[in-house]
Amino acid sequence: MAPPTKFGPKLDFYLATCRERAPLDHAPDKEEIIRAIASLADPLSVSYTTFETILALERSPLCAHASILLTGSHILPSCIQLLRQYCSGRTQLFDYAYGYLCFQLMNLSIEVAKLAQVNALPKFLHILKSSSRGTRDKAITEELAVHVREWEAKEFTPGGQFLLPASNLLGWGIDPPTRMPTALPGIGGFTILDTVFLMEKIWESRGKFLRCLRSALRLQNYAGWCGIFHLMHDTLVRMHGMSHINGQEFDEYQNWITFTDIMQRYSLCANHYEEPTVSYLIKNRPNHQREKLRITALDPADVDQIVGAYINKARQQPSIVYAHATRLFAFAMTSCHLDKSKFVTNVTRITEAALADSWARFGQMRGGSTGLSFWANFSDSVINTLILVPALNKIADLQRQTILKIIVNENLLDFLGYFVLYPLTTKDKTIIAHIGKITHWKYCTDSSLSSESIWKPLQ
């Protein structure tokens, strides 16, 4: 096994100390970064400090040279190969700083490559230069993430159409060795084999994955990994999600449910500017009505962090588009069944957080700061959450009465009363007209716990 100095400190320690020290003791120059990028092709010469050197591009003024990530056309395959060697034994992806930093570099390279693919990188770097005005050591990752999320939204598949992968941002080609479709050939390409490998390693390390996300949120240069998850999703769509493509294995179920489980954990810690993309990625897969509630928590400690992350997310009012808030509620509630000793406590905390979130949104509506689209999504979210309760009961019949006693209380009944009567008190005629559509919703309630009985967002 490689010595600890190669992989760096344990990830928990590394992320904690990152908040207390400068990004690098020695700021590299452009030439050092170029040499570090070239060294990625030689696994023996790569350590966690190699990634730190390249990630200096996340800060000003070196961010002006971000285009050097596009040189050599090997960053993605090199990083994948490095992670394969790193995880070849008992080491998991998020054990050491090495795995985290490699993943961070992949995400940065993907974000930059997407903008380059649509010829938007020079303009973005010019905007950064103008806004920084000589400021040193300013992290640009959030600005980059927000900008790329806006580009991703332009290629979302409209509702009711077959899933299609982003074509402009990802620049699909054919990988010569495997003859498989590959995305982002400008940085070496990314195929379904890479997607499956990353999913397997994240899934194996899912407890540490969530712990890593919760710690990384406090770091100045961490702006999420939505870029790489968008790429993984669209690679799955390209291989398993479209119709009428010769050689395509339609709807590879196991790949999709693994990806969805990973994204549910990621969603608990997603930044607010990531939520439009994250909610789309979770919802937008073939036959998503086959989705079933699954307990994927590892142990009671994992349940604790899922519950804690959900409560924190509920305070931030997660997106209600695509019934996203309901999906997060379902994931957290389902996880509670693994820890019988804290079941009542955890369910109580989750339902109280969800109801507090709903009251806050209702207050926004009564304040007149929202319109029809907000009401449509909000009413959709409330009704889907209510429909979810019987499905949760089916997971563990012995706790059915316990769940109902916790959920059905005076606070909930007060909220439902205000919610039902709201259309009678508003002067907004568009909302009144919308009520007629709600009464025509149809829900399937079969015993399979398919998502038809849970998610039925208004089209």
Image (cartoon, grey):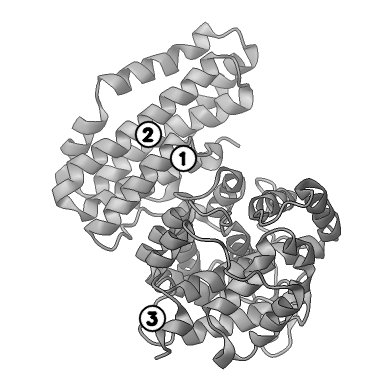
Q: Describe the element under mark 2 as helix, strand or loop.
A: helix
Q: Quick check: can you spot residue 447?
A: no
Comparing 270 with 233, the one in front is: 270
* Mark pair 3, 2: CA separation: 37 Å
Residue occupied by mark 2 = 354
Q: Report the label total.
A: 3
Percent position of residue 144, x then y:
70, 54
Tag 1 near tag 3, CB within 8 Å: no
Q: Nearer the viewer, mark 3 or mark 2?
A: 3
Q: Amino acid at mark 2?
A: Ala
Kindly identify which numbered label has been placed on residue 395. none
Kindly identify which numbered label has been placed on residue 325. 1
Q: Residues within 10 Å of mark 2 (few under 14, many from 20)?
A: many
Q: Quick check: can you spot residue 374?
A: yes
Q: Residues within 10 Å of mark 1 (few under 14, many from 20)?
A: many
From the viewer's perspective, is 54 left or right of 421?
Answer: right
Residue occupied by mark 3 = 91
Q: Describe the element under mark 3 as helix, strand or loop.
A: loop
Q: Quadrant of the N terminus?
A: bottom left
Q: Amino acid at mark 1?
A: Ala
From the viewer's perspective, is 19 left or right of 274?
Answer: left
- Compare marks 1 and 3 and give the one earlier in the sequence: 3
Comparing 55 with 397, the one in front is: 55
Tag 2 near tag 1, CB within 8 Å: yes
Name the residue located 59 percent from the left edge and 63 percent from the top edge.
233
439 w.r.t. 13: above or below: above
Percent position of residue 76, x then y:
65, 77
- Compare marks 2 and 1 and give the one earlier in the sequence: 1
Name the residue located 35 percent from the left edge and 83 percent from the top edge.
90
